[in-house]
Image (tube, grey):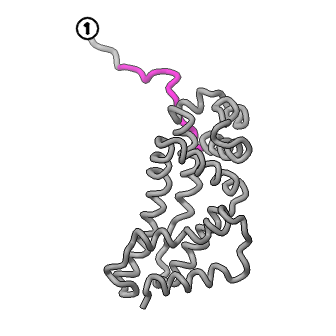
């Protein structure tokens, strides 16, 4: 008896990128308006105009969904194209940090997310893995390029240097809620060049 070829299962989920984008936008809107603690899968589905099953086909839990949504925004803003000089790279890096932290929605999300990660070790670990580590990896690439060009010493403390890249802008915007005066990024870049011992 000849065996019939097996047919693909009907109703198999095909994840449509445009729906994923709509859901990610809805997650960000809900986070900005309600915070992590009050965010629900039901509210995200309603805002996105999809059923909850569309969410669960993509992510197994609220935490996975939130981390994916924030990562989709945060990581691309840390791209570090090679301008040929540390000073040029710093200009792009600092503008990327500013664009990330000053986004009106993300500006409201960040303090809440920091508070939640302080209470939730699993969320803290997931955030570090999906957002913090990829962003820092891009910063390390920029600094290693400068070392290879001879602009920075080979024994530069990379971990400390990467902390300094985002910390001043984060402190000014998120912690102090202060404005960035004209020329702030240029002054910060020059200060970082000196702190890093750039040649």
> Where does residue 181 sit, x and y in percent of width and height?
73, 78
Locate the C terminus and report the quarter of the image it occupies.
bottom left
Q: Main secondary structure of the magenta part?
A: loop
Q: Left or right of 37: which side holds 191?
A: left
**Residue located at (50% from left, 32% from top):** 60
Residue plotted at (63% across, 79% down):
185
Asked if residue 137 lies in the magenta stretch, the reply is no
Q: Is the residue marked by circle 1 packed among few (<14), some (14-19), or many (20+) residues within 10 Å?
A: few
Is 18 or 3 nearer to us in this picture? 18
Mark 1 falls on what kind of element? Answer: loop
- Seen from the viewer's position, the closer of residues 10 and 49 is 49
Looking at the rendering, which quadrant does residue 22 occupy?
top right
Q: Residue at x 64, y 66 (%)?
A: 99
Q: Position of residue 149 (x, y in %)?
A: 37, 85
Find out whether residue 13 is within the magenta segment: yes
Q: Going by the picture, which residue comes out furthest to the left?
A: 1
Question: 8 and 140: which one is in front?
Answer: 140
**Residue 68: x, y in percent?**
54, 45
Q: Which residues are magenta?
A: 6-18
Residue designated by label 1: 1
Residue 193 position (above or below residue 177): below
| Of residues 108 and 15, the one drawn nearer to the viewer in this rendering | 108
- Quadrant housing the N terminus: top left
């Amino acid at each position: 008896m000849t065996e019939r070829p097996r047919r693909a299962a009907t109703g198999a989920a095909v994840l449509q990128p445009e729906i994923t984008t709509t859901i990610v936008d809805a997650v960000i809107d809900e986070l900005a308006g309600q915070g992590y603690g009050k965010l629900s899968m039901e509210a995200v589905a309603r805002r996105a105009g999809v059923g909850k099953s569309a969410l669960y086909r993509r992510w197994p839990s609220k935490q996975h969904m939130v981390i994916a949504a924030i990562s989709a925004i945060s990581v691309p803003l840390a791209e570090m194209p090679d301008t040929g000089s540390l000073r040029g790279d710093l200009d792009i890096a600092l503008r990327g940090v500013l664009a990330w932290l000053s986004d009106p929605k993300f500006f409201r999300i960040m303090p809440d997310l920091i508070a939640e990660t302080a209470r939730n070790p699993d969320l803290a670990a997931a955030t570090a893995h999906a957002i913090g580590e990829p962003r820092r990896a891009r910063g390390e690439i920029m600094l290693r390029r400068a070392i290879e060009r001879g602009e920075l010493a080979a024994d530069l403390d990379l971990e400390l240097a990467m902390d300094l890249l985002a910390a001043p802008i984060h402190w000014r915007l998120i912690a102090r809620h202060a404005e960035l005066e004209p020329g702030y990024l240029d002054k910060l870049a020059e200060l970082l060049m000196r702190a890093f011992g750039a040649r």
